[in-house]
Image (tube, rainbow, N blue to C red):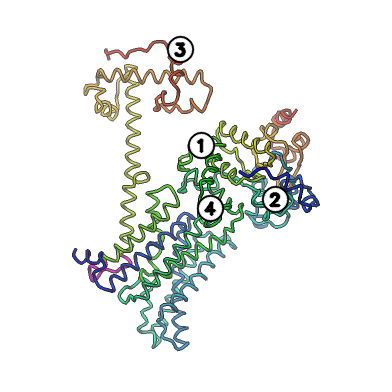
Amino acid sequence: MTPPASLKLASHEGRAAEAAPGPEAALAIRGLTVSYGQTPAVFSADATFPARTMSAIVGPNGAGKSTLLKAALGVIPRVSGEVTAFGRPVAEARERIAYVPQRASVDWDFPATAGDVVLMGLYRRMGLLGRVTGAHRRTVRACLGRVGMADFEGRQIGELSGGQQQRVFLARALAQGADLYLLDEPFAGVDAATERAIIDVLKALRDEGRAVVAVHHDLSTVTRYFEHVLMLNVRPVAEGPVETAFTAEALDATYGGRLAATHMDSLILATA
Amino acid sequence: MDTLISALLLQAGYNAALVGIGAALLGVASGAAGTFLVLRKRALVSDAVAHATLPGVGLAFVAMVALGGDGRALAGLLAGSALSAWVGLLAVEWMTRRTRLPEDAAIGAVLSVFFGLGIVILTLIQTMSAGRQAGLEDFLLGATAGMLFSDAAMIAVGGAVAVALVWALRRPMTLVAFDAEYAAATGTDVRRVDLAMMALVMGVTVIGLKLVGLVLIVALLIIPPVTARFWTERSGRMVWGAAALGGASGYLGAAISASAPALPTGPIIVLVAAALFALSLLFAPARGVLAAMLRQRRFQARVHRRQGLLALARSEPILEPYTIRVLVAEGLLRRDGVATEAGRAEAARIARDEKRWEVAREIHRDAALTGRYDGLTPIDAVFTADEIAEFDRRLGPPMPVGGMA
């Protein structure tokens, strides 16, 4: 684990202070457009996810939420747009960014143990030929412990439940010791205990001064889990603190009337 | 048999010994390199690469003759094969990336077109005066008759380089094979890792051309890794297991083919590898077919035992013959369907366990604990003794299962 260096780094970097979003932005996206063929999946999206904050990206299916994250990280190519993390281009800030992909995006029959997967989070630091040291193993164990999976280090990943697999993915991101955590649907298809464990870890990260950005599909928990929200439906519809941006009008505009009005009221009331 | 033993001991002549050592080294290299190919689920790309070597062999021959050379220099032929294999590989890659063609269609197209082109070139060479004795068709299925020391040395050097590269690139290749998106997000150039992996496969293919031939080299790249997968759940061990299995297949296959005059080396090596695969498929401890069948049978017996005992506890008749067999075999039931002393005691115990679970689900709202009820897990494997005592207090004293039934 590296100490939370985000504050120090951001403040003594003159360049970061000059940049438009200011040093407080953990992730800033300007004019991002991504397309599959000729159809834009994300069109001209701007977003500024603040540091030391838990942010959600919400929107209907096919709204480009996951695409936005992947394009911001350079996992898929973008047509246009600029993305900076802590005031620097993403490619130069990789050490400070950890990504948690969707659990369903990998084949869990891969020959690896939970510990092996978490160790992957340290590959970058180890380099091609560096040895796995005792310190690396301790980090792996500590990160598994943090997500409540200390006893599962030697377990084959295919034998884990869906929730446990999601925790292993989070532990791998923790091992990177990053300052910005980008998660793609971390609560999709996990049990209640896992959801609680994950949100506790994320809140702890926020309290340590790190930034969390999660693609989120469960509107009923937005106000409880997050402080900042981006509402996306190919184009960004609304963005800002949850109290001001997560409104009935914004929900209606994002989901295009697909949410029943009564349901929407219950979501908004939860804020008050 | 004597000839096989002498071949195994490298005593069957100079040529046979060279072939044996060369085949073993080739097997080690192809097993190690093939592991990541299999893990990346791109095994068939190697088939396209192998078939795409053929035009290069022919064209290299023509070029060397045109330059006034012999045309049969192995290094030149292999360089040509590598070049055209690389072109074939890039064609597959380009088609998959730039068009809507799925990868298997691109592989099929490249494989057959390059192979067809290669056959045309080879046929034309046959009609050239210099080409009559070229023996280029040996590259199709491999030939060991004229194996030279330099050929074996080339396999040794090429194989060692391939194994060293696998070792050096094992982390990026593992990462890309397991989770390419995460790899890209952490700054790994996925396309470059993929190309490096394919270059490795191509290198192994090229050094294996002379010995095994382009049609069968795919088997050496794929079969040892999938065999190794039966025995391990770690990718690192799979690499070395595949290398060992590939080496053993090469060595054993070469020895068998040397022990009889008419046995072709390449195909025998592949058959040996396939035999090891079949053995693993059947008998591997965790992933083997037999182990899975045994596991399923044991599970079935546990279900029937539990259901039968619960029926006894409720004084219901047991109708299923399999249930009766399971209980009789354990001495819990007599052949005439009457419970034995031990059977009644066990039925009472199981009935009690079931009742405790009911109470547990009533008073314990912790879904993680009560969710472990599957009808088979005994409650004392989940709850502590004092918790069970609490359930019992609510249940009252245990009820014996009557002997009247």
| Neighbour tally class for label 1: few under 14, some 14-19, many 20 plus, Cα within 10 Å | some
Magenta residues, start to end? B257-267
Secondary structure of residue under mark 1: helix
- Marked residue nearer the N-terminal end (4 or 3): 4
Residue B312, percent across and down? Answer: 31, 19
Q: Is there one chain holding both mark 1 and mark 2? A: yes
C-alpha distance separating marks 2 and 3: 60 Å
The amino acid on which the numbered mark 1 sits, given as a three-letter code, is: Ala
Mark 3, residues whose alpha carbon is within 10 Å: few (<14), some, or many (≥20)? Answer: few
SS of the residue under disc 3: helix
The residue where tag 2 is placed is: A42
Query: Which residue is outermost to the top?
Result: B396
Q: Residue at x 37, y 65 (%)?
A: B25
Q: Amino acid at mark 4?
A: Leu
- Marks 3 and 1 close (CB-CB < 8 Å): no
- Quadrant where the N terminus of chain A sits is top right
Task: Tell me, yes or no, whether the two marked residues, 4 and 3, touch with CB atoms within 8 Å.
Answer: no
Residue type at the position of mark 2? Val
* Whether labels 3 and 1 share one chain: no
| Residue that appears at 42% across and 47% down | B233
How many angstroms separate mark 4 from mark 2 (CA)? Answer: 28 Å
Query: Which chain does the numbered disc 3 sit on?
Result: B
In the rendered image of this protein, does residue B337 appear above or below residue A131?
above
Q: Spatial distance from mark 3 to mark 1, Cα to Cα? A: 35 Å
Residue occupied by mark 3: B394
How far from the left and from the top, in percent, is residue A262? 71, 29
- Look at mark 4 in the image and give the residue it sits on: B175
Q: Is residue B68 magenta?
A: no
The quadrant where residue B187 appears: bottom right
The kind of residue tagged 3 is Arg
- Kindly identify which residue carries mark 1: A150
Disc 2: host chain: A
